[in-house]
Amino acid sequence: MLPLGAIGDRVGRKPMLITGLVVFGIANVAAGLAPTTEVMLAARVSAGVGAAMIMPITLAVITSTFPEEQRGKAIGVWTGVAGGGGILGMYLSALLVDIVDWRWLFVLPVVLVAIALAMTLRSVPNSRERSAHPFDTVGALVSVVAVVGLIFVLQEGPERGSTAPATLIGLVVGLVAAVGFIGWELRRRDASLLDVRIATTGARATADGAYLSAAMRLLVCRDHYRAHDLCP
């Protein structure tokens, strides 16, 4: 999300949002029609890339189009919809698996993508940021390593065990990369991929806390469904 969001800021937020919606929609169609596990996994990876294009751009569009006095309320709505929608999607997915077929899990996203794409083409203005600094490639790569390492621990730790070598290696790699990313971004300052200093501001800290709380509830729901064989 972070590198693709930064790229979208440079090339244009509306084109990146449209591209993300198209990639996400096509990937969900491919997943719903997947004849093999390999095709399903490839489609889900592609859907993840499309989602990573969409999410940061939606927030960037809000901050660039809403006036300052309305921006806090708009970001609050965005945070609530993102967190609540993720949790609602888990319950809806379990319901669809119970009453119809797992392939229907990918029908609703395609419908929502079509609606979002039509609204984007009609209503979302294009905007971009011009930077005198080159793209922070090092920061982008280190951030990916950090996220992959930590997500691996959250995803595989409960099954492999907290003391398994793979879990410990993933944790160490993720933490070291996260600390390295923060140090690198503080060093680059205005040329950084992400100004990590803004995380200490009140409004941003509140939004980040709310989003993290929603993400943790989503992980709990996921583990609950997995324990009851309600998700693949």
Image: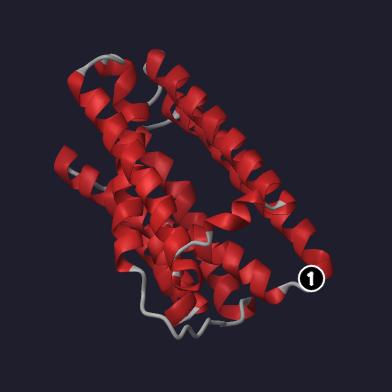
Tell me what residue is drawn at x 42 percent, y 31 percent: 100
Q: Amino acid at mark 1?
A: Glu
**Which residue lies most toward the right here?**
69
Q: Secondary structure at mark 1?
A: helix
Tell me what residue is drawn at x 45 percent, y 79 percent: 10
Q: Nearer the viewer, residue 161 or 197?
A: 197
Tell me what residue is drawn at x 79 percent, y 70 percent: 68
Q: Is residue 159 visible?
A: yes
Which residue is identified by label 1?
Answer: 68
Q: Is residue 63 left or right of residue 173?
A: right
Q: Is residue 87 left or right of residue 134?
A: right
Tell me what residue is drawn at x 60 percent, y 62 percent: 59
- In the rendered view, tell whether residue 16 sits above or below residue 91: below
Q: Nearer the viewer, residue 33 or 156?
A: 156
Query: Could you tell me residue 167's position as x and y percent?
Result: 26, 24
- In the rendered view, tell whether residue 11 sits above or below residue 71: below
Query: Could you tell me residue 144's position as x and y percent?
Result: 32, 51
